[in-house]
Amino acid sequence: MDLDIARVRFQYHVGKFRYDESIGLVPGDKCIVNTEEGQEIGTILNFSKVADVNTELLVYFDESGRVQNGYADKDAEGSDERRGRFNGPQNADRKAVPRVKNDPHKIYELVRKATADDLTKDAENEKLALEAAKICREKITAHTLEMKLVGAHYYFDRSKLLFEFIAEHRVDFRELVKDLAGHFRTRIDLRQIGVRDEAKIVGGCGVCGRDLCCNCMKSDFEAISIKMARDQNLSLNTAKISGLCGRLMCCLAYEHKTYCELKHDLPRIGDTVVYNEVRARVRDINLLSKQVLIDTEDDRQLYVKVEELTRHGVPAPERKEETAVPDAPA
């Protein structure tokens, strides 16, 4: 099954949505999309075609904007558990199934191109959100809660008002939610986020001089480990490889796979190699230029290309075959 996909940029993230080419959109256009949280407005980044889409990733909505099911065939019969993932249990005796928040792996639908009225409404929503954030901060102070409000966001259809905050510990904000709901007369979603999410929302400038990746291009976070820095021969000083959020930089994952592939064709530091019939030990490696620094038995230090080396008498790229080979004569 081929599917037309549009990548849409929102205020804090990027999402993918299926669309109909007859809508007539081009990159840069504003559009209205359906999500499980409510309708949103975003900007088209680009288009692509995806083949062999898993139909279980498709999410459909009814005329009222509610999730109808998560499958391509709207008339398909499924078990109560499968249908209940979005609509709740079909049997009253079953326990309620909690509704899943927007899943980055699922494909939602693009409704239409935004009109002039939609753009006006979006600008009004931004002003209302700023006012709502100011009121929420006052109420947080009144309730003496140890939390920091990061921002407020009105969904495009104003079906829900979202407040995102950070806190060192879990906060009991039930009374605050009741107070906010009574003031704004709409559904309130008070959500605790982490420091990486805060950087994604607030934005900023990274050490590279560009906007933060999480704020301008990434739709979801991925696991970053210190091993990625080690594989790329970067400094293991966490202060140098951490972003504004204090966590390891997201860009460590961008080239990690390439570096791992390059290392397969290179000897390891400490390996014994042969250069011009002289035994030597690998002291340093330059992955990108495929050169190594060697200490030879005759007390020389040289930068040489990998192609000029043999490892125990065998060409260096063959090092991934872990067979024992007799040492070459000195």
Image: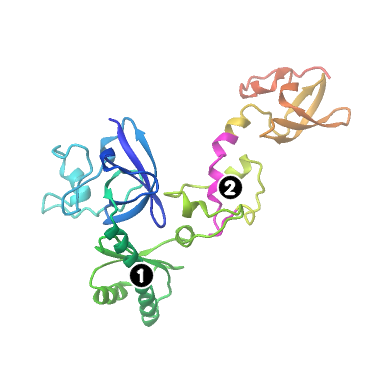
Q: Residue furthest front?
A: 116
Residue toward you, 282 or 42: 42
The structure's colour scheme is rainbow
Q: Amino acid at mark 1?
A: Lys
Q: How many marks?
A: 2
Residue 182 to residue 126: above or below: below
Q: Residue at x 46, y 49 (%)?
A: 217
Q: Position of residue 322 (x, y in %)?
A: 62, 22
Q: Residue furthest bottom?
A: 142
Q: Amino acid at mark 2?
A: Ile
Q: Residue at x 42, y 49 (%)?
A: 219
Mark toward the viewer: 1 or 2: 1
Q: Is residue 309 visible?
A: no
**Taking 260 as reference, is 91 left or right?**
left
The residue that disc 1 covers is 127
Residue 3 to residue 15: above or below: above
In three-dimensional space, the C-alpha distance between marks 1 and 2, rounded to whole angstroms, equals: 42 Å
Q: Residue at x 25, y 54 (%)?
A: 99
> On residue 112, which mark appears?
none
Label 1 SS: helix
> On residue 226, which mark appears?
2
Residue toward you, 54 or 96: 54
Tell me which segment is drawn in magenta.
242-259
